[in-house]
Amino acid sequence: MKLIKRKLRLAVIAVSILLMSLVVYGVYSLGVSGNRWFSSSVNTSLRKVKQGVIPGRIYDRNGIQLAGANVKGERLYHTDEITRRSLVHVLGVPDGTVKNGVETFMSYLLYAYDDSYLTRLTAAFSGQMRTGYDLRLTVSSGLSRMITEQFPKDKSGAVVVMNYRTGEILSLNSFPNFDPLQMEGVATNPKKPYINNVTQWRSAPGSIFKAVTMAAALANWPDALDRTFTCTGAYQVGETIITDAGNARHGEITLQKALAVSCNITFAKLALELGDEQFRLAAQAFGLDDHLLFSDLVVENSLYPSSNRVAKELAWTGPGQSALFVTPMHMCLVAAGIANDGVIMEPKLLIQSVDRNKQGKAQMTPTVYKKAMTPQHADVLAEAMRQVVVSGTGTRAAVPGLKICGKTGSAQIDGQTSTNAWFIGFIDEKTLPYAVCVVVNDAGEGSRHAAPLARQIFEYIKNQR
């Protein structure tokens, strides 16, 4: 009998521990990705919540209304088509076609999910529609519209602009886009305009990744800036020959100069000398391989190549090729971290939500995502990126009167003849703390097709201050 009681007691304890573990895990999961769960298509409660609710209005950072609703709860949008197209991937649409849009990811606010049971019951008996919370976003509709007007009409790609001190996203433009008032055929369009290329599309970054490679060198070699490298125009690694654009021969070259002229050979040598483990750790310090579940949006994780690679694969990772895949949002975070003394802030989309009584329900708080590098190394890297714009491949991003730092990239895609044009950069001024990432697919060199658009963005920001 005693044995039975003892076994029963142990069973009760085991079940209790299991239940407690499930509760703890549930609380943790809701805290980390509660928004994602709430907005998921498998959450049947969401569809019920939307019934009988007029969704809240959505405003940009300057108070311009981007979306409203009629008395039936049907969405209304800005009267200007270009503005609607510019912000469709930020806002999303009610049916969830754009998976990470505010319409889906912040639906718990837009549809006042936390209304009390009494409020819901009163509305149900009275037959009145409840009203969701209004949202004020970090984005600038004016900047977003300008980017749409200037982006090449026949190309796909992405542009993201953020405040590197606070994490506020000023623009999040994905191309191709669509008009939320003309949804027919969007879901079946082979160009997939519903995909948010800023957060969901991944590709090789090309030479913009040399900023990360240089950060790895600075972190591992105290004498990195004093070293010189030899570029003869060709560098053989196994059966692979690494060359530079136009078969350029840079001769004896410093690390800073190598970044300015975007020397593939120097950065391939850096990768091999660093070795896979040290290079991987430096890349992971910037968030590669992380699951990027932020409070206001979800970003597909950028992928550093798997370990135990052959020498040629490691060598090509240095210049940003090989099996390396990143999102534009992530590369903007890399630029932002370099600009912000090595500290990467969590990207934010929501400034504030306000209920029907004009009471604030949620308020933006700047949050540190990662400390990627020391302030000293960040300063060195920022100066090297400054020289890229002053005298290197990024001169087309220069703006008179502004201290612009940047890096161009031209990413060749395996198995394709196309080249994606990239640019990352930032304004190195306390009063204008903004970073940018531009990618134009199948366009050619980043210096010619991405840097000029970055310049227009910097000019717009300068003129708005």
Image: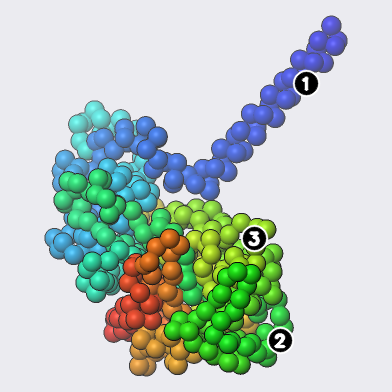
- Dot 1 or dot 2: first in sequence order is 1
| The C terminus, quarter of image | bottom left
Q: Is residue 287 left or right of residue 463?
A: right
Dot 2 falls on a residue whose secondary structure is loop
Q: Nearer the viewer, residue 331 or 80?
A: 331
Is residue 157 in sight in this rendering?
Answer: yes
Indicate the secondary structure of the residue bearing disc 1: helix
Q: What residue did someone put label 2 on?
A: 223
Residue under pointer 3: 309
Question: Amino acid under label 3?
Answer: Arg
Mark drawn on residue 10 = 1
Q: Position of residue 36 (x, y in %)?
A: 44, 45
Q: CA distance from mark 3 to mark 2?
A: 27 Å
Q: Position of residue 12 (x, y in %)?
A: 72, 20
Could you tell me the amino acid type at mark 1?
Answer: Leu
| Kind of element beneath mark 3 | loop
Residue at left offset 45%, top offset 41%: 37
